[in-house]
Every structure is written in C-alpha cells, then in structure tokens.
C-alpha cells in the first residue's frame, strides 16, 4: 500500500499520517479523549465546584482586612447615599420655609465634611488617647446637657428641649455626644475593672456605670427626648452584656428600665398616641397616626425600583419630617424595594464588621468600645426603620449617617473612625497593611526577583 493510499484512508488527512510514520505521537480524535457527554468524559464530582466556590468565598471573608474594608466602605456609602436623599427629601421643605432648595443639603454636606475629618482623626488615634479623652468628653457632655435645661440657653424643637443654638443657622444637640461619651467612658471603666478582676462582683459591675448612665438619662428625659433615652439605654445594656452581667442582674436592670419607660409613656398623651399607632392603617379620628400612615403610603408607592430620585409625592407636605426621622420612607418611595434593601444590607455589613472587631480583639477596652458603638448604630437603625415600617412606635431618632442633622452625624462618624482604628490595630490587619505600603511592597518584590546571569537577556 502506498503512502498516498495510507493518507487517504487516514481520517485526519495527510499531515497526521506523515507524523505517524515519522514516529510522532498521533493526536487522538475528540471521541477517544472523552468530551462532555462522551463515554470517556472525566466529570468532576457533583458539588465540588460549589464547594470550591464556598471555600474561596469563606477564605476571602476571613481575610484580616475584611472588617476594615467593610466598616470603611459601608459607612461611606451610607453617608453619600444619605446626602443624595437629604437633598431630594428636603427641597420642598426648604421652599416651604422660603429658603433655597439646597439649604438643608448644604448644611448636611458641611457636617459630612467636618465628620470626615473627625473620622480620619479618630481612625489614626491610638487606643490610649481614646481612653484619655473619655473623661473630658463625659464631663463636657454632662455640662452641655445641664445648660440645655437653663431657660434662655436651651431651646425646644418639636416639644423636646434638648438644643443649644450656636448662632445663625447652627444648633447643637448635646445628648448625641452623650452617647459617644458613655461608650468611651464605660469601656475604659470596665476595662480597668477587668484588669483588676473586679467584674465578678455585681457591685463593681454596676457602680458607677449604671448611676452615671441614669444621670445622663435623667438629663435627657428632662427635655422630653424619649427616643434618645431609648438608644442610651440600649448602649448601657450592650456594655453590661459585653461585661458578662449575669442573667438575673441583666433582667433586673431591664425590668426597671421597662417599668420607668412605661410610666413615662402613660403620663404623656403624645407618647401614648405614638404607641397606639403601631401597625396603623388609618389616620385616626384626630389624625394622630398621620405620620405613621403616610410613611407606609410612601413605601407602598415605591414598588420594586421606585419612582426615581426627586419624584416623591409624599414629601410635598404630606409626610412630616421627610428629611430627618422618615427619610427611609422617602428612600423607599424614590428608590423602591431595591434601594431600601441596599440600605439595610449596608447597615448589616457595618454591624457585622463591628461585631467581628469586638470578637477578635484581646484588648478589653477595644472590645467594650467596639461593642458599644455597634450597639448604638444598629439599635438606632432598628428603632428608626422599625418606626417607618409601623413595627415600632415613632421615637423621633434619626437614621445613623443617613438622616439630616449635623449633631447626630458628627459623633456617629467619630464613632465609625473608632471602629476603623480598632480594625487597623488587629495584628493580622496591621501586618497586611504594612505589606501593602508602597515602600515595603517594592522591597518585598525586589527580594523575590532573582538576579539573572550576566549573559542572559
């Protein structure tokens, strides 16, 4: 048989036949190698691909800098989205007051710029300096909260006397700084007592933490601010829980706080009406549930993706406080379910990162401070969003980092800077950040490059 006949009979043509005769390896046809669905196919076991993806995601989630990036990214995204929503929700309110449409946005933007500076400063401060600032901050907050109750100095807004005017359009709410002061001072106090092994005794766990917290609560309640008092109580419970308070002690303090809160609610008609508007779908005979019902209207009209930025109907005089307490309702109307779920996901990421920082540290001060800040932000977000959804009474607290209000934004951004500083101080995170510095990375790369021989190109 000639070579031409062999090539003709070979199914892959002359070239393969020549390589075969030359002693080269013959390429097998696809059916012989085994293709997808063929008899010789080598399929991976079922579930291995999904398991590999899960393991890769878990390793990525467990990296040292995960908490650092979650805190930084989620807080900045919430703040930027809040600025957008404040501008959209406050335009009509500003025009009603004969002010420029961007009036509230400009004030919030100024507060965000100052808050960013506070965040950067707090993120670079060591824990020792934070502990040194705790006592002056607490004394300053108490002093300002006492000034609020002096006639002529303190001013009432919406029935709550908890503001001090600084001149012009600027005003200050000292109780917002009282939250931060209680966290830093309480964390330093509990850390020192833990070092001395005194937290096993209930009197050392409660005194002087609980009396000082009750002093702050009393000053807040003198002004009638029930919402801020609820958040401060949540911070106190968070610190006690992190300190390992026994169940009976924890339940006792919770029972006393609930009893006092119930008495304060029953003695105030406005608070009783707010309590009765939980889950309301009717405005009520005197319109006492107007805000709660119109908040539900705003969320219901948003649909899946909202009516678009600036296209809210409820902000045209129907929904009270659209840029402060009920800005989440405007976000639901303009951004829809997708927008509200995105906001919830950002707060969940921030809360998870704070819990991770508190759980992985060996420094007791960092654990108490990070846990207190996380309790503050998450509890306030739950109270605000729960009120908008009709699941909780309207407490009059802003949505952290999102609602309008410089007095609330400044201490919150400083608290976020605390979390960033604590996340950076983790040994593994510190090593990872050191490697990513330009100088260190360049030196590391130079060590890994092998010198080539002199004649090699």
Image (cartoon, rainbow, N blue to C red):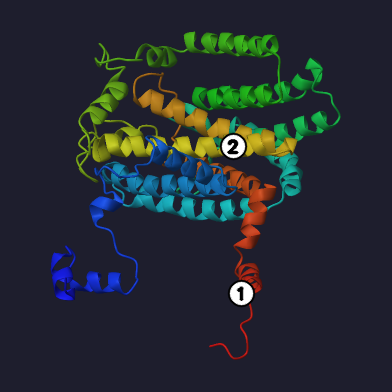
Residue 377's spot in the image, x, y percent?
52, 34
Which residue is at the front of the view, 283 or 97?
283
Would residue 250 be found to the left or right of residue 349 on screen?
right
* Badge nearest the viewer, 1 or 2: 1
Residue drawn at the location 71% of the way across and 14% of the way down: 246
**First in sequence: mark 1 or mark 2?**
2
Numbered tag placed on residue 449 in the rendering: 1
Say which element carries label 1.
Answer: loop
Count of picture labels: 2
Is residue 294 in sight in this rendering? Answer: yes
Label 1: how many Cα within 10 Å (few below 14, some 14–19, many 20+): few
Residue 121's spot in the image, x, y percent?
62, 55
Residue furthest right as drawn: 196
Which residue is at the front of the view, 242 or 149?
242
Which residue is at the front of the view, 304 or 390?
304
List the residue tagged with mark 2.
356
Residue 382 higher or lower than 112, as above or below: above
Would residue 412 be found to the left or right of residue 7 on screen?
right
Residue drawn at the location 26% of the way across and 30% of the way down: 299
Is residue 165 in sight in this rendering? Answer: no
Residue 403's spot in the image, x, y percent?
41, 39
Quadrant in which residue 434 is drawn: bottom right
Residue 81's spot in the image, x, y percent?
37, 47
Q: CA distance from mark 1 to mark 2?
A: 37 Å
Label 2: how many Cα within 10 Å (few below 14, some 14–19, many 20+): some
Residue furthest bottom as drawn: 455
Residue drawn at the location 57% of the way across and 47% of the way down: 63
């Amino acid at each position: 048989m000639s070579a031409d006949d062999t090539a003709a009979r070979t199914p892959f043509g002359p070239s393969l036949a020549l390589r075969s005769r030359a002693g080269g390896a013959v390429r097998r046809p696809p059916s012989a190698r085994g293709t997808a669905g063929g008899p010789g196919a080598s399929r991976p076991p079922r579930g291995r691909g999904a398991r590999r993806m899960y393991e890769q995601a878990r390793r990525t989630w467990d990296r040292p800098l995960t908490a650092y990036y979650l805190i930084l990214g989620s807080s900045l995204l919430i703040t930027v989205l809040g600025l957008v929503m404040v501008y959209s929700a406050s335009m009509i309110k500003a025009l009603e007051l004969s002010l420029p449409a961007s009036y509230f946005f400009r004030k919030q933007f100024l507060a965000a710029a100052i808050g960013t500076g506070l965040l950067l400063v707090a993120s670079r401060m060591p824990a020792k300096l934070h502990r040194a600032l705790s006592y002056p901050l607490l004394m300053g907050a108490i002093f300002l909260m006492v000034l609020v109750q002096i006639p002529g100095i303190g001013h009432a807004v919406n029935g709550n006397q908890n503001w001090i005017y600084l001149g012009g359009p600027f005003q200050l709410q000292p109780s917002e700084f009282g939250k931060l002061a209680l966290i830093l001072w309480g964390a330093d106090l509990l850390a020192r007592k833990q070092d001395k092994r005194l937290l096993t005794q209930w009197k050392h766990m409660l005194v002087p933490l609980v009396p000082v917290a009750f002093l702050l609560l009393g000053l807040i309640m003198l002004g009638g601010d029930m919402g801020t008092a609820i958040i401060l109580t949540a911070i106190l419970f968070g610190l006690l829980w992190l300190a390992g308070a026994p169940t009976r002690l924890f339940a006792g303090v919770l029972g006393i706080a609930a009893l006092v809160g119930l008495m304060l609610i029953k003695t105030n008609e406005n608070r009783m009406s707010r309590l009765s508007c939980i889950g309301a779908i009717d405005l009520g005979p005197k319109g006492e549930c107007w805000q709660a019902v119109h908040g539900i209207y705003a969320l219901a009209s948003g649909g899946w993706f909202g009516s678009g930025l600036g296209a809210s109907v409820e902000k045209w005089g129907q929904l009270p406080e659209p840029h402060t307490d009920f800005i989440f309702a405007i976000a639901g109307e303009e951004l829809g379910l997708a927008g509200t779920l995105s906001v919830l996901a950002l707060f969940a990421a921030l809360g998870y990162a704070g819990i991770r920082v508190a759980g992985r540290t060996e420094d007791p001060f960092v654990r108490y401070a990070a846990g207190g800040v996380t309790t503050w932000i998450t509890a306030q977000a739950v109270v605000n969003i729960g009120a908008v959804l009709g699941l909780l009474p309207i407490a009059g607290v802003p949505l952290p980092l999102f609602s309008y209000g410089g007095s609330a934004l400044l201490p919150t951004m400083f608290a976020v800077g605390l979390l960033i500083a604590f996340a950076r101080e983790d040994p593994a995170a510190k090593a990872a950040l050191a490697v990513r510095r330009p100088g260190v990375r360049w030196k590391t790369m130079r060590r890994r490059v092998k010198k080539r021989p002199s004649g090699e190109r």
